[in-house]
């Protein structure tokens, strides 16, 4: 009990404001272990300061882990629509390409046939059009039978249909429309076509070499192009947190590879089923990755800033003892001269205050200045 007296006297010697020799730290026998009673003189000396626990509303943040992946809305598998041989490669792995940019050039006999059919259809249409016009003139002059006029009209309609079919076929293979509209006498049969990128992005996969025969397998992927400036992150949310999770809420994402970087995103999908093994629901996040730091398949942590709120209790760091140990504690007031050593669970630390997640209520008061004296006295009791 006398250690508190010694410590108080030492502080009085050092504190100009407390030089009154009549002021002494005097503790009275505690009614139960972990409690202290201090003399009125010591309490009035100003060496002990008591503050209420601070309570403030704060948005609830749900933290979870997840994995980055491609945004499937901006991912394209590129294959050859025709069987042919690769004669030129224009795009390499890792290159940035624009929509419509040539990835490879393929020589295909099927394209040669389609090109030949188109030229023939153009020529047939020109002939059928002239025949139909002549038939109409002869019919007007009553110099041709009606059935012959009807036959000329049918041939003209058929020629237009054939031309439309062969034209659309070449357009689907990437032949420029302007080239198909050139004068008939300048058209040539072509067997090479350009394999182009459907979207702008990065070439993340390439499975083609010069001279390779492609197009025989419809599932064959020659290139994979992905826009990596935006990624999807798939995360797991526990059932208890589902009421807090809604599409459109903001998300902060961090990766171990870039501990100082913070990536912004939002929730765009909340799963409809619960995993029976983990009792979690899949949530998809869309994350801004314009600096291309995040990589698909990279593990990340996500902090979802929900619309829900909770009351956060904080105290001054001066009130906390044993920080970093298994059981930190503070001293709370029971009555005017009685104090209790209270175990607490610490939360986030902000400047000179720390959150208390367990052990205190908003109605409690804690000792800040002078708590070191109370801590020394309780240690003395425990060891004595």
Image (tube, rainbow, N blue to C red):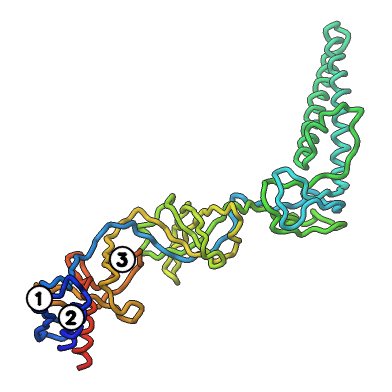
| Residue named by callout 3 | 353
First reached walking from the N terminus: tag 1 or tag 3:
1
Using the numbered discs, state the Cα–Cα distance from disc 2 to disc 1 in whole angstroms. Answer: 16 Å
Closer to the observer: label 3 or label 2? 2
How busy is the neighbourhood of tag 1: few (under 14 within 10 Å), some, or many (20 plus)?
A: some
Mark number displayed over residue 88: none
Q: Is residue 220 visible?
A: no
Question: Could you tell me which residue is drawn at 78 percent across and 42 percent down?
Answer: 173
Q: Which residue is mark 2?
A: 8
Which of the marked residues, 3 or 2, is nearer the chain's N terminus? 2
Q: Is residue 358 left or right of residue 269?
A: left
**Above or below: residue 151 compared with residue 108:** above
Task: Locate residue 270, reporting x and y percent.
Answer: 45, 56
Picture coordinates of residue 317 (x, y %)? 29, 70
Q: In the image, what residue occupies the spot 35% across and 53% down?
A: 307
* Label tally: 3
The quarter of the picture where the C terminus appears is bottom left
Depth check, front residue: 185 or 343: 343
Disc 3 element: strand
Question: Is the C-beta separation of discs 1 and 3 under 8 Å?
Answer: no
């Amino acid at each position: 009990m006398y250690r508190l007296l010694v410590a108080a006297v030492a502080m009085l010697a050092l504190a100009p404001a407390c030089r009154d020799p009549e002021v002494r730290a005097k503790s009275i026998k505690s009614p139960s272990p972990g409690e202290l009673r201090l003399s009125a003189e010591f309490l009035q000396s100003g060496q002990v300061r008591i503050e209420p626990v601070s309570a403030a509303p704060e948005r609830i943040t749900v933290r979870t882990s997840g994995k980055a992946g491609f945004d499937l809305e901006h991912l394209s598998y590129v294959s050859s629509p025709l069987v042919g041989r690769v004669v030129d490669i224009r795009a390499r792995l890792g290159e940035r390409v624009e929509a419509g940019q040539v990835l490879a050039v393929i020589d295909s006999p099927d394209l040669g046939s389609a090109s030949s059919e188109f030229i023939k259809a153009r020529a047939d249409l020109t002939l059928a059009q002239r025949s139909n016009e002549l038939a109409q003139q002869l019919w007007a002059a009553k110099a041709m039978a009606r059935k012959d006029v009807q036959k000329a009209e049918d041939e003209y309609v058929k020629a237009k249909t054939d031309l439309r079919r062969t034209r659309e076929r070449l357009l689907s293979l990437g032949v420029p429309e302007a080239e198909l509209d050139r004068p008939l006498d300048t058209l040539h049969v072509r067997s090479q076509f350009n394999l182009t990128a459907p979207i702008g992005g990065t070439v993340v996969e390439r499975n083609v070499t010069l001279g390779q025969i492609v197009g025989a397998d419809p599932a064959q992927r020659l290139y994979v192009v992905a826009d990596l400036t935006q990624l999807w992150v798939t995360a797991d949310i526990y059932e208890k947190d589902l009421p807090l999770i809604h599409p459109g809420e903001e998300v902060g994402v961090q990766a171990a590879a870039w501990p100082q970087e913070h990536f912004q995103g939002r929730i765009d999908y909340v799963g409809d089923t619960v995993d029976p093994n983990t009792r979690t629901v899949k949530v998809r996040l869309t994350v801004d990755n314009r600096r291309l730091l995040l990589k698909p398949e990279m593990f990340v942590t996500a902090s979802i800033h929900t619309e829900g709120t909770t009351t956060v209790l904080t105290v001054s760091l001066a009130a906390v003892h044993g920080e970093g140990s298994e059981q930190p504690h503070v001293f709370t007031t029971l009555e005017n001269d009685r104090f209790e050593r209270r175990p607490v669970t610490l939360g986030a630390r902000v400047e000179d205050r720390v959150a208390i997640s367990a052990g205190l209520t908003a109605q409690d008061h804690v000792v800040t200045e002078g708590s070191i004296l109370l801590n020394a006295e309780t240690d003395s009791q425990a060891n004595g």
